[in-house]
Image (tube, coloured by chain):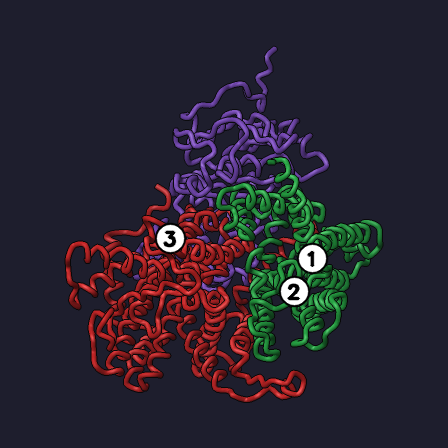
Chain colours: A purple, B red, C green
Amino acid sequence: MSADAVGAEPDERAYGPDDGILVADDLRKEFGGLTAVDDLSFAVQEQEILGFIGPNGAGKSTTFNCVTGTYPPTDGTVYFKGEDVTGISAHDMVKEGMSRTFQEFAPLEDRAVVKNVELALAPDELFTLSGMGGETEQLAREICRRVGLGDVMDQTPSELPHAGMLKLELARAIATQPDVMLVDEPFAGLSGQEVQELTEVMESLRHHGMTLIVVDHNMRGLLNLIDRAFVIQFGSKIAEGTPEEIKNDPEVQEAYLGGEEI
Amino acid sequence: MATETPLEGDVGRRRRQAVVEKLLLRDLALRHRLGILGVCLLALVPLLAQPRELNQFTYVLYLMMFAISWDVVSGYTGQLSFGHAFFFALGGYGTSVTVNQHLLPLANDLGLTLGPVGTVLVILGGIVGGTLVAALGGVLIGVPALRLDGPYLSLVTLIAPLLLYQSLIIFSDEGSLPVLAPGGLGGTSGLLNTPPSFVGIGGLNTAVTVDQQWVGAVARYYISFLALLIVLAVTYGVTRSAAGSVFTAIREDEDAVRSVGMNPAKFKIFAFVLSAAIGGFAAAVWMHAGPNAAPNTENLFGSGRIDLSINVIVIAIIGGMGTIVGSIVGALFFAFADTVIGGLDVAIPGVELLFGSELTIADTSPLPTFLLGMLALVFLPRGVVPELTRFGRRLLAWRRGEVDTLLGRDRSPSTLKRTAEKYREEIEEIVGGESR
Amino acid sequence: MVLGEIATATVTAVFLSALYAIIAIGFTLIFGVGGILNFAHGAFITVGMFAAFLVTNSNGLVELPIWAGLLAGTGAGALLGAVTYVGIVRYVRDRPVTVLILTFVIGFFLIYAIRIGASDILGVDDPLAIPVPQVMGTDALNNVFILVTSWLLIGLLFYFVNYTRTGRAIIAVSQSDKGAALVGIDAGKINLITWTVAGAFAGYAGVLLAGAFGSGSWLMSIQPPAPLILSFAIVILGGLGSIKGSIAGAYIIGFAETFAVNFVPGGQQLAGVSSLVLLVVFLLVKPEGLFGRGAAE
């Protein structure tokens, strides 16, 4: 009788701070009369790569804007590493250990790629010797190499192709040494080979201890990468499970009917 | 833990060592060596100039410091200040009031007669007081400025000196401002009792008396030069460190700064306070060491209440915003232009015919320098120093055979151009729709 | 009787506000249409005053009655607005930081030129007191004149903007440059018209302001009542780019200032400075304004 079907997870379960490294409990965000995030709950496990999937307008970006501190949620709680971090500011979230990349790249055009990464390594101090001695620069260079920007790190961001900008975003986020990193729509506009390269970088990051959340509306590139998926539409969860389970979930297929490929 | 330095070992020690190495002038890039050469040349000026010229040139040192003060906040963090004289006035009046209305009366009450050392100490106390007052002014502007954007910020900075000016008039009389300035603020003619100077021939009101004009002039120059070195040391220390790159990052994109875990507000306020302190410090020293220095509105605000505020902007624009060196070069250029124009006793043709009185080019000051500033803004937005640096680099690269031609279009756009590009992109995004 | 005092103050406030409205309207137009905060606005006002002087004073060019002065001032303002746009602003319209600094420096360039012109060329004794006569013989009549023309002109502007083709084109451009272009409106031409009209209003305001105060001054844009700052205050208070909002803002500030001066102890000191103080307070407390887009981030 009670169909314990895959995807029909008990939504009423309350998530607590210890259910994962990043936990959202009954998250709600309203803009005026519009509900963008509708009592959403999820838990991200340490060192997993979680895919956060949904069609355009489903509320993915809004959810994570609330989580990462761009704006506070209307209601609900966010727990990070066991602590309640609901509503704290974006830069404090980064300090706590949660970084994100941005879909709308905004690299600093007035400086080279490597300098962009160096900024992310700057200490939050007014009086600092950091910057003298060249150590930070060396580290920045290393990070650039690791994400595949080795050849272009002395150019300005405006000279980078789309894939390069993405890698810069990643490098900047990595430089803040996050425990959890949110990657926002990384595969948009990339060629097959670039997708593969990026997947390898992210796998490597996970291997080194990072937890990753990848947000995207296109499942194709994603399903090879992620361990687990969480699908949302209209601000609510519609499915959760392994990539295989998700692919076969009828609700998910309906949400994407006529839309993106699965 | 995120954003702690991931570097290995005793980073602090290695960095301190690096700073020491730099101070010992080892392994410096060419442009740094040129800079040091320039500073040495400035130090040698008194050997080349007459006392009267030296007095005029001393003022240029203060222009440099004022412009550096402006550049720290406006050039680096992009918070454009249109009324920077606010801080200069706070510093100048601050020290005068501290010395003449607090410290000297205190010494009197205590029955002390101040010899040279005592007077110098009192003067230093005044300078500290002036700098602190100005720094307070920096907080007063910097904190509200966080809530404001672009032009509205600039507007508030324009209003601040106007309000201060009015306050000087309102509280001009003795007793109108009890605890803070018992002697009053002097109104538009300024405080009539000039504060003591470091050096002078007068005997009264000076710490050290000398009997020859030129000795006094040289001494004043070197005191001012010392102040400049202090200002340079402080600003260099801040802007060449990681904090400096955060400043410029704030100018470019505050969200980018937030996204790497730093709070722009902290840095923005700091920039204002630092800028204010530098400006106030310079003005305070000027009151005690400068040629013809007196705490009045003409000096500290410029004629018409806004002259000085505009001049520092013009200087920094010509020399190069967001570089400290630009202010130095810009001030030299500005002073040079001003002197040249001042000497142009050439009547403008036609004016006498139409209006019956003569107008020489010299009479039109300060218009020519404003014009230069406007032209620089439109045609040379980067400023002299960055342009020269880039030209120099190209020259070297050309000689090394790395590039074919000496002149070429530069790819990386100027600060102003980038800001414009950003605005245009944003507008196109709104109007043009998603293009992904 | 307190009631009598209040009545008098109200009347004064109404007259003052009418003048303030004329001062601010040109500024609003330019901002509404081009998104440009014209820091040279105070200079346009000063130029209007100076043109009136030139045309009504023996030290000037000719000595004609004040009506000619009014025309000259308005015309000079209009011309200046047009020239500023055509000669400079339209080339740098896409560089907001440059426009900001440029209009600032241009504004002060102009008023310094006026100072030099007045004292060095024309032999005016004190450029801080450039004589400009009132339009009407008595203070009371003058005030009425200001009030009447203020409403008349603003009414005309309203009609123009809402009921004529060109006027509606101005609204269209103020909402979207590109959108307007799509329906065939030439943004350049509209901007030119806007700057000209704004300049005309500013010039007219300058003549009235100088007359009401007895004389103009080369620094009048920032000396009390500091029309440059006042314009900002009114426009921000009323919501940027909204004509209705600016009028409301003018009346709010006019009333606040009059009542503060008359009823707050020590209020005389505040005359003309209250706009500065109000502006700062307002920017800090409620930068969104009453009606339109805000100054806050």
Q: Observer-nearest residue: C198 or C287?
A: C198
Looking at the image, which residue sits at the far front? C1
Q: Mark 3 points at which residue?
A: A122
- Quarter containing the N terminus of chain C: top right
Number of residues whose C-alpha sits closer than 10 Å to that of mark 3, classed few (under 14), some (14–19) or many (20 or more): many
Q: Which chain carries label 3?
A: A
Whether B28 is drawn above or below C210: the answer is below
Instruction: Give residue C24's position: percent from left, percent from top.
Output: 66, 54
| C-alpha span from label 3 to label 1 | 46 Å
Give the number of the disc on residue C26.
1
Instruction: Give residue C85's position: percent from left, percent from top.
Output: 69, 66
- Asked if residue C32 can be seen in this view, the reply is no
Q: Observer-nearest residue: C18 or A129?
A: C18
- In the displayed structure, does residue A150 sit left or right of residue C11? left
Q: What amino acid type should be assigned to the residue bearing mark 1? A: Gly
Q: What amino acid type should be assigned to the residue bearing mark 3? A: Ala
Q: What amino acid type should be assigned to the residue bearing mark 2? A: Phe
Task: Report if the CB atoms under discs 3 and 1 are less than 8 Å apart.
Answer: no
Give the SS element for disc 3: loop
Task: Report if the CB atoms under discs 1 and 2 are less than 8 Å apart.
Answer: yes
- In the displayed structure, does residue B294 sit left or right of residue B340? left
Q: Mark 1 lies on which chain?
A: C
Q: Which of marks 1 and 2 is nearer the N terminus?
A: 1
Query: Are the numbered discs 2 and 3 placed on the same chain, yes or no?
Result: no
- Asked if residue B63 can be seen in this view, the reply is yes
